Image: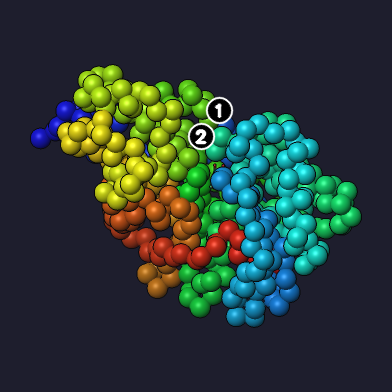
Amino acid sequence: MQNREELFLKENGLDVDGIDREALLSAFAEEMAAGLAGSPSSLMMIPSFISIDRPVKTGEPVVVLDAGGTNLRSAVVTIDAAGRAAIGSFAKRAMPGTQGELEAEAFFDAFADFLLPVIEASVSIGFCFSYPAEITPECDARLIRWSKQIEVPSVVGQMIGAGLLKHLEQRGYTRRVVILNDTVATLLAGKSAGVARDYSAYVGFILGTGTNTAYVERNARITKRTDLDPSGSMVINVESGAFRRVQQSVFDATMDAQTIDPGHYTFEKMISGAYLGWLGFTVLRAAAQAGFFSAEAAARIGAWPTLSNKHLDDFCGGQPTPDNPFLEEAFSDGDRAAVIRLCKPVYARAAVLTAVNLASAILKTGEGRDPARPVCVNVDGSTYYRTLTADFQNRVQRELAELLGPRGIAYELIRVEEAPVIGAAVAGLM
Ligand code: BGC
């Protein structure tokens, strides 16, 4: 039997059981093929100009810069002959552009200044840049647009590597930089960690502040480029968070309209850490108006400026810390039960869509038919590993098995600590 909350969600277009997984897989496959051909598609299928079989210099340090959705991090990494990475001199600060709008000059200054303490370690910088960017054959990156609500509009369209190098030159340092997406880095880290095992293909997957996939494609199939060696292959950054052929619920549309980039990254806005709390909050506000809560609880929800994903997930996942807003006195036991019934499906849906996202990339490799040679999927990201609600990680894995099992596809999900940093180092040392 359906409860009122489930019915309310369903009436507004949020229906976990009703998701047509197979139709989504087909739509992903079509969009991926169109993206490779340069036809209109919501999936950019960006060539990385990184092939996975190039040798990696060992025993030599490389500077790593990792620009993620929340943090900017730097490190010095050395890889030994056995493929083990030693990471030192870790530093971290907030990602420029997450704390209010910035100008391009201030943005590049922040990056260059942040690198100064480690800049002497190497002339090479491996730069993991976790945003949609067109990569040049020299591995610089032109920012296509910001995702994850970063506010540095004047950098859009600019070369990120050239900007950084110019600001380093101004400080007296001439360097070279290799830029790659975090999913590409994660794939490379999986490859370098998995040397002992015989995998047929590699996928990199991130579910953190944002979401995305990468896989290895034959150049002959990247028909939108005519300058590639047809016998080679390279990693493709799918930018799967931008997938558009998924039905938004009323709540998704309401939240999307409040973002700085409405209509863009609608898939990411349904599943990643930057948005899940916000989306749950949108559901709760609508439910409060529809009379699902006591007057006190409804007034509290109406008064909150935001709700963090951590607070909502901790609460719905049964592990709230004492500062959790749902523990406020205004919430009765009935209110709290309603919050869980209303928001758990938000996370359950994210798990289903995450499995579709992953399955699409695994299927696109065309490999995994021999159980002795599975597809290696390196998974990274706080949202994947830390979400408590709806038995998140297990649910993703069950859904994935249901999608790929009947197709006879063998795959293995692996985890490499600090994958984006290690992958950026590998790229910098290639
Ligand atoms: C970005 C991708 C990135 C992903 C995971 C998305 O918002 O557009 O480039 O790979 O987040 O960090």
Q: Name the front one of labels 1 and 2.
A: 1
* Image side of residue 416 versus residue 137, left or right: left
Q: What residue is at 55 percent from the left and 28 percent from the top?
A: 261
Disc 1 + disc 2, Cβ < 8 Å: yes
Other-residue count near label 1 (Cα within 10 Å), few / some / many at <14 / 14–19 / ≥20: some
175 to the left or right of 255:
right
Judged from this view, the residue extending furthest toward the front is 329
Q: Secondary structure at mark 2?
A: loop
Between 365 and 4, the one nearer to me in the picture: 4
Residue 292 or residue 385, whichever sits in front: 292
Residue at 40 percent across and 68 percent down: it is: 370
Residue 265 tag number: 2
Left or right of 134 in this view: 148? left
Place of residue 409 in the rendered image (x, y in percent of width and height, measured from the top left): 37, 60
Mark 2, ligand 1, within 8 Å: the answer is yes
Q: Quadrant of residue 154?
A: top right
Q: Quadrant of residue 143?
A: top right
